Image (spheres, helix red, strand yellow):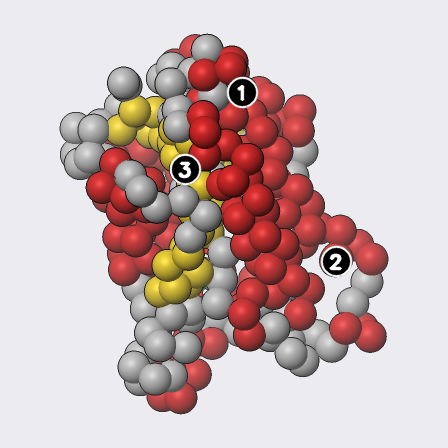
Amino acid sequence: MEKVLLVTGGSRGIGAATALLAATEGYRICINYLSDHSAAEQVCSQVRALGAQAIAVQADVSNEDEIIRLYSRIDAELGPVTHLVNNAASISHASRVEDMSEFRLLKIMMSNVVGPILCSKHALLRMSPQHGGQGGSIVNVSSVASRLGAANEYVDYAASKGALDTFTIGLAKEVAGQGIRVNAVRPGYIFTDFHVHSGDPFRVSKLEGDLPMRRGGTAQEVAEAIIWLLSDKASYATGTFIDVGGGR
Ligand code: NAP
């Protein structure tokens, strides 16, 4: 089976590290991004330099019309998706729940919950034998925040990742008989630009002294777990989670 991988939010951080690792594993790769075209093209060039076919496609994963356009491009240029990493997500500045606006909550739930569900829906339409596919593998990028709750800061973000965890368990059971595995990776504090969007670019270095391992993690360390779950090496793993949180 030709392996065609979609990494949502693949232009930076954990998504980019995942695309680069996948490049040496025989995947054709679509790097999706929201706004930073040059960053996505740069990752694409790095992936191609490692010998893999790659395209960069802009699409907002919280909008189904854009997801349909994204999958159509992949169908035409790489072939039907066989592997999906639901990695794109958003976060807002630290806030208590009583100060959270409806706009903020809808934005987070659309990108972090509805987006991965819709991206999975369109992947299943290509992976499922009932739709002419040959099975596949989905990895959702959650967070240890789903277990911890992120009180006083990002309860909305933590709740969105809790929903993603539940989706992982339910979808895994729903499609296990169709040769499709669904798993999740839950990172802890990882050095990426994600924290710029949370209002504290230096968050990981500030907090790492209090972590069990006394350091933040790297995008590469998270990508290793994603790539393993995605691959046939994890052939009997579905509905499961790997926490990459340095003991947190
Ligand atoms: P990042 O460096 O901020 O990268 C985010 C990526 O997602 C970018 O490629 C961005 O594209 C894209 N994106 C954002 N919203 C999107 C949307 N609506 N549609 C399509 N693409 C979108 O983030 P990261 O730290 O690598 O995080 C990746 C995943 O790990 C997320 O699910 C996050 O919740 C999870 N995570 C991260 C940490 C951490 O400490 N970093 C911890 C736990 C979990 P543009 O650049 O073009 O906007």
Residue 48 vs 183, above or below: the answer is above
**Residue 125 image label:** 1
Any atom of ligand 1 within 8 Å of the CB at mark 3? Answer: no
Q: Is residue 97 left or right of residue 224?
A: right
- Mark sitting earlier along the chain (1/3): 1
Percent position of residue 125, x then y = 53, 20
Can residue 87 be seen here? The reply is no
| Image quadrant in which you'd find residue 52 | top left
Q: Earlier in the sequence, mark 2 or mark 3?
A: 2
The amino acid pointed to by label 2 is: Arg
- The foreground one among 11 and 244 is 244
Q: Secondary structure at mark 1?
A: helix
The residue beneath circle 2 is: 104
Task: Give the residue drawn at x 27%, y 56%.
Answer: 220
**Is residue 191 found left or right of 124 in the rendered image?**
left
Q: Quadrant of the N terminus?
A: top left
Image point (40%, 88%), residue name: 210
Report the residue marked by disc 3.
Answer: 181
Q: CA distance from mark 1 to mark 3?
A: 14 Å
Amino acid under disc 1: Leu
